[in-house]
Amino acid sequence: MRQLFLGLILIIFLLSEANAAGKMYSSVLDSHCTSWNLNRILGKKSSCRSRAKRMSQAEVGCRLKKVTLNKNDSTMTDCIYERAGYNLGSTTVTLEENGICPRTIKCKRN
């Protein structure tokens, strides 16, 4: 009788839906606050007005590494830039009509 009761409870648990309150945490709050509002002067609780950008979201400077003609179209120029920082890789920008590549640009970190 006991095994039948335990088996019945086990079947109920296995067949029922699991309603969990899962939360997705955003990494926006992980960065530190750069400016606070002035409510503390008025005796109220102060809160953060703006947070610092995370390193993965900030743009980095890219320096011109090499200039080549595009393989597919000879009227286009490929500007190859290297991201400033350790082991961040390189990126390529294509300019039309053999444009002149700027020496430095801002590019995404990833």
Image (cartoon, rainbow, N blue to C red):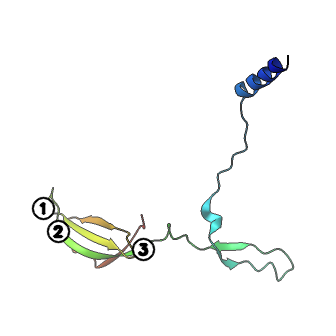
Say whether disc 1 or disc 2 marks the residue closer to the N-terminus: 2
The residues bearing labels 3 and 1 have C-alpha atoms spaced at a distance of: 30 Å
Q: Does the image show residue 50? A: yes
Q: CA distance from mark 3 to mark 2?
A: 23 Å
The residue carrying pointer 3 sits among few (fewer than 14), some (14 to 19) or many (20 or more) residues within 10 Å by Cα, namely some
Label 2: which secondary element: strand
On the image, numbered disc 1 is attached to which residue?
74
Q: CA distance from mark 1 to mark 2?
A: 10 Å
Total label count? 3
Query: Does residue 102 appear to the left or right of 76 in the view shown?
Result: right
Nearer the observer: mark 1 or 2; the answer is 2
Residue 60, disc: 3
Q: Earlier along the polypeptide chain: callout 3 or callout 1?
A: 3
The quadrant in which the N terminus is found is top right
The image quarter containing residue 107 is: bottom left
Assess whether mark 2 and mark 1 are in contact (beta carbons under 8 angstroms).
no
Residue 79 point in image, percent of width and height: 24, 69
Residue under numbered circle 2: 68
The residue type indicated by label 3 comes to Val
Taking the image as drawn, is residue 98 in sight?
Answer: no
Give the amino acid type for the residue marked by disc 2 in the picture: Thr
Helix or strand or loop: what does disc 3 sit on? strand
- What is the x, y in percent for residue 6? 80, 23
Left/right of residue 10 with respect to residue 57 in the rendered view: right
Camera-nearest residue between 4 and 51: 4
